Image (tube, rainbow, N blue to C red):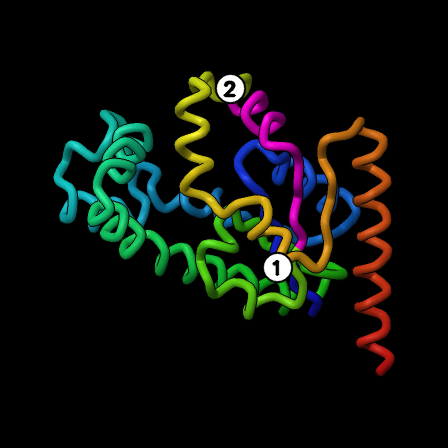
Protein backbone atom coordinates (compact mmCIF):
# COMPACT_ATOMS: atom_id res chain seq x y z
CA UNK A 1 0.00 0.00 0.00
CA UNK A 2 1.26 3.49 -0.82
CA UNK A 3 1.80 5.32 2.47
CA UNK A 4 2.41 9.07 2.54
CA UNK A 5 3.53 11.33 5.36
CA UNK A 6 1.83 14.73 5.28
CA UNK A 7 3.44 17.53 7.25
CA UNK A 8 3.77 21.29 7.49
CA UNK A 9 4.35 24.03 10.01
CA UNK A 10 1.71 25.27 12.43
CA UNK A 11 -1.01 27.13 10.55
CA UNK A 12 0.01 25.75 7.17
CA UNK A 13 -3.35 24.07 6.58
CA UNK A 14 -2.42 20.41 7.05
CA UNK A 15 -5.83 19.38 8.36
CA UNK A 16 -7.70 21.07 5.54
CA UNK A 17 -5.51 19.43 2.91
CA UNK A 18 -5.77 16.03 4.60
CA UNK A 19 -9.55 16.28 4.68
CA UNK A 20 -9.56 17.05 0.95
CA UNK A 21 -7.59 13.86 0.27
CA UNK A 22 -9.96 11.91 2.51
CA UNK A 23 -12.90 13.22 0.47
CA UNK A 24 -11.22 11.65 -2.57
CA UNK A 25 -10.97 8.27 -0.86
CA UNK A 26 -7.64 8.33 0.97
CA UNK A 27 -7.34 6.76 4.41
CA UNK A 28 -6.16 9.19 7.09
CA UNK A 29 -4.34 8.65 10.36
CA UNK A 30 -3.74 11.93 12.20
CA UNK A 31 -1.06 11.60 14.87
CA UNK A 32 -2.07 14.91 16.47
CA UNK A 33 -5.62 13.60 16.98
CA UNK A 34 -4.15 10.44 18.49
CA UNK A 35 -2.08 12.61 20.85
CA UNK A 36 -5.29 14.29 21.99
CA UNK A 37 -7.03 10.93 22.44
CA UNK A 38 -4.36 9.44 24.68
CA UNK A 39 -4.24 12.59 26.84
CA UNK A 40 -8.03 12.95 27.12
CA UNK A 41 -9.79 11.99 30.38
CA UNK A 42 -9.11 8.30 30.95
CA UNK A 43 -6.59 8.16 28.10
CA UNK A 44 -3.75 5.68 28.27
CA UNK A 45 -1.18 8.44 28.81
CA UNK A 46 -2.87 10.01 31.83
CA UNK A 47 -1.53 7.69 34.55
CA UNK A 48 2.11 7.88 33.42
CA UNK A 49 1.80 11.65 33.01
CA UNK A 50 0.58 12.07 36.57
CA UNK A 51 3.39 9.82 37.77
CA UNK A 52 5.95 11.95 35.95
CA UNK A 53 4.57 15.45 36.49
CA UNK A 54 2.09 15.23 39.36
CA UNK A 55 -1.66 15.89 39.37
CA UNK A 56 -1.12 19.54 38.45
CA UNK A 57 -0.53 18.46 34.84
CA UNK A 58 -4.26 17.72 34.51
CA UNK A 59 -7.28 19.95 34.00
CA UNK A 60 -10.27 19.57 36.34
CA UNK A 61 -11.93 17.23 33.81
CA UNK A 62 -8.99 14.82 33.96
CA UNK A 63 -7.42 15.65 30.60
CA UNK A 64 -3.83 16.79 30.30
CA UNK A 65 -3.61 20.56 30.64
CA UNK A 66 -2.08 21.28 27.24
CA UNK A 67 -1.50 24.99 27.87
CA UNK A 68 0.25 24.38 31.17
CA UNK A 69 2.31 21.54 29.71
CA UNK A 70 3.26 23.62 26.68
CA UNK A 71 4.56 26.38 28.95
CA UNK A 72 6.41 23.84 31.06
CA UNK A 73 8.25 22.10 28.23
CA UNK A 74 9.13 25.40 26.55
CA UNK A 75 11.07 26.42 29.66
CA UNK A 76 12.43 23.01 30.66
CA UNK A 77 14.05 20.72 28.06
CA UNK A 78 14.10 17.81 30.53
CA UNK A 79 10.32 18.10 30.92
CA UNK A 80 9.98 17.99 27.15
CA UNK A 81 12.04 14.82 27.01
CA UNK A 82 9.95 13.19 29.75
CA UNK A 83 6.70 14.16 28.03
CA UNK A 84 7.83 12.81 24.68
CA UNK A 85 9.15 9.66 26.34
CA UNK A 86 5.62 8.97 27.56
CA UNK A 87 3.50 10.09 24.63
CA UNK A 88 5.55 9.21 21.55
CA UNK A 89 5.66 5.42 22.08
CA UNK A 90 1.91 5.40 22.79
CA UNK A 91 1.16 7.47 19.69
CA UNK A 92 3.28 5.13 17.59
CA UNK A 93 1.53 2.07 19.01
CA UNK A 94 -1.95 3.42 18.19
CA UNK A 95 -0.78 4.62 14.78
CA UNK A 96 0.61 1.23 13.81
CA UNK A 97 -2.52 -0.58 15.01
CA UNK A 98 -4.73 1.68 12.89
CA UNK A 99 -2.45 1.43 9.88
CA UNK A 100 -2.59 -2.37 10.05
CA UNK A 101 -6.40 -2.19 10.10
CA UNK A 102 -6.39 0.08 7.03
CA UNK A 103 -4.09 -2.27 5.14
CA UNK A 104 -6.16 -5.32 6.05
CA UNK A 105 -9.44 -3.65 5.03
CA UNK A 106 -8.13 -2.86 1.53
CA UNK A 107 -10.80 -0.23 0.93
CA UNK A 108 -8.56 2.79 0.26
CA UNK A 109 -6.22 3.56 -2.63
CA UNK A 110 -3.51 4.94 -0.33
CA UNK A 111 -2.89 5.95 3.27
CA UNK A 112 -1.90 9.41 4.51
CA UNK A 113 -0.36 9.94 7.94
CA UNK A 114 -0.77 13.52 9.16
CA UNK A 115 2.39 14.15 11.19
CA UNK A 116 3.03 17.74 12.33
CA UNK A 117 6.55 16.87 13.55
CA UNK A 118 7.50 14.47 10.76
CA UNK A 119 10.83 16.16 10.07
CA UNK A 120 11.65 16.63 13.74
CA UNK A 121 10.96 13.01 14.67
CA UNK A 122 13.77 11.68 12.52
CA UNK A 123 12.13 8.29 11.88
CA UNK A 124 9.09 9.03 9.76
CA UNK A 125 11.02 9.59 6.53
CA UNK A 126 11.98 5.92 6.50
CA UNK A 127 8.47 4.74 7.44
CA UNK A 128 6.60 6.21 4.47
CA UNK A 129 6.94 5.96 0.72
CA UNK A 130 6.54 9.68 0.07
CA UNK A 131 6.54 12.92 2.04
CA UNK A 132 4.01 15.63 1.22
CA UNK A 133 4.67 19.10 2.62
CA UNK A 134 1.92 21.71 2.93
CA UNK A 135 3.77 24.99 2.61
CA UNK A 136 2.94 28.68 2.99
CA UNK A 137 4.64 31.93 3.90
CA UNK A 138 5.55 32.35 7.55
CA UNK A 139 3.42 35.48 7.84
CA UNK A 140 0.47 33.45 6.61
CA UNK A 141 1.12 30.87 9.33
CA UNK A 142 1.29 33.55 12.00
CA UNK A 143 -1.92 35.25 10.89
CA UNK A 144 -3.83 31.95 10.76
CA UNK A 145 -2.75 30.79 14.21
CA UNK A 146 -3.52 34.16 15.79
CA UNK A 147 -7.00 34.09 14.24
CA UNK A 148 -7.61 30.42 15.10
CA UNK A 149 -6.10 30.11 18.58
CA UNK A 150 -6.00 33.66 19.87
CA UNK A 151 -2.26 33.42 20.52
CA UNK A 152 -0.03 36.47 20.49
CA UNK A 153 2.50 36.90 17.70
CA UNK A 154 5.32 36.11 20.13
CA UNK A 155 3.61 32.89 21.20
CA UNK A 156 3.27 31.75 17.59
CA UNK A 157 6.88 32.62 16.84
CA UNK A 158 8.01 30.65 19.88
CA UNK A 159 6.18 27.58 18.59
CA UNK A 160 7.59 28.04 15.10
CA UNK A 161 11.13 28.27 16.44
CA UNK A 162 10.73 24.81 17.94
CA UNK A 163 9.55 23.35 14.65
CA UNK A 164 11.56 22.51 11.56
CA UNK A 165 12.16 25.41 9.22
CA UNK A 166 10.50 25.69 5.83
CA UNK A 167 13.83 24.83 4.23
CA UNK A 168 14.20 21.69 6.37
CA UNK A 169 10.72 20.51 5.44
CA UNK A 170 11.24 21.22 1.75
CA UNK A 171 14.52 19.28 1.83
CA UNK A 172 12.67 16.02 2.59
CA UNK A 173 9.60 16.68 0.43
CA UNK A 174 8.68 14.48 -2.50
CA UNK A 175 5.58 16.58 -3.12
CA UNK A 176 4.62 20.12 -2.11
CA UNK A 177 1.26 21.87 -1.86
CA UNK A 178 1.36 25.67 -1.84
CA UNK A 179 -1.37 26.86 0.53
CA UNK A 180 -0.90 30.59 0.09
CA UNK A 181 -3.27 30.88 -2.83
CA UNK A 182 -7.04 30.80 -3.36
CA UNK A 183 -9.18 27.71 -2.60
CA UNK A 184 -9.47 26.74 -6.26
CA UNK A 185 -5.68 26.53 -6.51
CA UNK A 186 -5.61 24.21 -3.51
CA UNK A 187 -8.31 22.00 -5.04
CA UNK A 188 -6.31 21.69 -8.25
CA UNK A 189 -3.14 20.71 -6.41
CA UNK A 190 -4.92 18.04 -4.36
CA UNK A 191 -6.56 16.65 -7.50
CA UNK A 192 -3.21 16.46 -9.28
CA UNK A 193 -1.52 14.63 -6.42
CA UNK A 194 -4.47 12.30 -5.91
CA UNK A 195 -4.13 11.30 -9.56
CA UNK A 196 -0.37 10.84 -9.12
CA UNK A 197 -0.76 8.65 -6.04
CA UNK A 198 -3.39 6.51 -7.72
CA UNK A 199 -1.14 6.07 -10.75
CA UNK A 200 1.73 4.99 -8.50
CA UNK A 201 -0.53 2.43 -6.84
CA UNK A 202 -1.70 1.13 -10.23
CA UNK A 203 1.88 0.92 -11.51
CA UNK A 204 2.96 -1.02 -8.43
CA UNK A 205 0.03 -3.40 -8.75
CA UNK A 206 0.79 -4.17 -12.38
CA UNK A 207 4.55 -4.54 -11.91
Indicate whether 132 appears above or below 199.
above
C-alpha span from label 2 to label 1: 28 Å
Please determine whether, in this image, residue 120 is positioned above or below residue 16: below
The dot on residue 84 is none
Q: Residue at x 64, y 32 (%)?
A: 137
Magenta-drawn segment: 132-145
* Side of 206 where 93 appears, left or right: left
Residue closest to the eye, 153 or 200: 153
Image position, residue 135 (x, y; %): 66, 41
Q: Nearer the viewer, residue 110 or 108?
A: 110
174 and 23: which is toward the camera: 174
What residue would you read off at disc 1? 172
Q: Is residue 138 magenta?
A: yes
Secondary-structure class at tag 1: helix
Residue 9 percent location from the top left of the image: 55, 40
Q: Residue at x 41, y 45 (%)?
A: 35
Whether 62 is drawn above or below 1: the answer is: above
Q: Earlier in the sequence, mark 2 or mark 1?
A: 2
Position of the N terminus by quadrant: bottom right
- On screen, residue 136 versus residue 54, left or right, reads right
| Residue plotted at (46% across, 62% down) | 122
Which residue is the site of mark 2? Answer: 146
Q: Is residue 173 above or below residue 202?
A: above
Residue 40 on the magenta span: no
Visible residue check, residue 62: no
Q: Nearer the viewer, mark 2 or mark 1?
A: 1
Q: Is residue 163 left or right of residue 75?
A: right
Q: Residue at x 65, y 49 (%)?
A: 133
* Residue 14 position in % (x across, y down): 62, 40
Amino acid sequence: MLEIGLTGGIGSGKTRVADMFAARGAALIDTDLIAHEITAPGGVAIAPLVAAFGPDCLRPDGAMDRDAMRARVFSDPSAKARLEGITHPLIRQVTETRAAAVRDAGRHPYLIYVVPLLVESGTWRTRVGRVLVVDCQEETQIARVIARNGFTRDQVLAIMRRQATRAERMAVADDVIDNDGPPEALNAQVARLDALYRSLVDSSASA
